[in-house]
Image: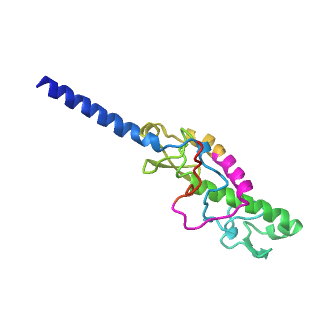
Amino acid sequence: MPIKLVSVVRLTALLVALFCVAPTFAQLPPDAVDLAKVKIPEAVKSTDLCPVKLVPSAADGETWTHGGVDYRGSEAGVKAAFDGDPDAHAAKAAEERYVSNFMLAMSTIWCPITDEVTPGGRKQVDGLGFTWESCCSFCDEEMSPDNFDEALERLRERAVESFELTGGIYTEGASSPVEGAIRDDV
C-alpha cells in the first residue's frame, strides 16, 4: 500500500507541476514578435481623433476632409489650426491613431508585469484606458495599477517602432494581432 500511495503522490505532484508550468511554455519574450508583421485592426478611425490636439474628437466637432481622409475636431478652431500645416497634422494624426490602435490590440496579449506575450485566457484588468491580460497565475495575483505606467511606456515604444516598420498599414479580420508575426529564430 505505501508504494501505491507514493506513486499517487508523485503522479499528483507531476500533474500539478505540469499544469502550473505548462502555460509558461506558451509565453513568448517581447522580441519574438516581428513588429513589421503585426496585424493591427483600425478600431480608432480618423474621425475619432482630433488631428491637431491628438485627443478624442468631439461628437459634434467640426468635420473636414484632407487628402481623402475625413477628420473631426475636438473643439472650435482646430480646423483653422489644421489648415496652417495640414500635411504635418495629418501625418502626426496618422501615427498617433496607429499607435492607439496598436496599443488597444496588443495590450490584451502583452502581460504588463513580465513583458511577455501571453498565451491567452488569463485574468484581464483595465489599466490606463487599456485592457491588459496577465500571462500566469503569479501575474494574476500581482497585477496592480502600478504595473501599467511602465507597461504602457514599453507598449507605446513598440507601437511607434511598428508604425515605422509597417507604414501604418492596418489589417482587418486577423485572428490575432501576432498572427504570422512570431519569429522562428527566438
- Would you place residue 29 above or below residue 109 in this image? above
As for residue 174 lying within the magenta part, the answer is yes
- Would you place residue 78 above or below residue 100 in this image? below
Residue 156 visible to an observer of this rendering: yes
Figure coloring: rainbow
| Residue 123 image position (x, y, % from top left) | 44, 47
In this picture, residue 178 sits left or right of residue 120? right
Give the magenta part as a residue range: 155-175
As for residue 23 lying within the magenta part, the answer is no
In this picture, residue 79 sits left or right of residue 37? right
Pick the quarter of the image with the C terminus. Answer: top right
| Residue 139 image position (x, y, % from top left) | 47, 39
Hey, which quadrant is residue 92 in on the image? bottom right
Hey, which quadrant is residue 151 in on the image? top right
Residue 55 visible to an observer of this rendering: no
Residue nearer the viewer, 25 or 58: 25
Residue name at image x 55 percent, y 57 percent? 179
In this picture, residue 1 sits left or right of residue 9? left
- Would you place residue 68 above or below residue 21 in this image? below
Residue nearer the viewer, 113 or 126: 113
Q: How many circles with numbers are drawn on the protein?
A: 0
In this picture, residue 85 sits left or right of residue 180? right
Hey, which quadrant is residue 65 in on the image? bottom right
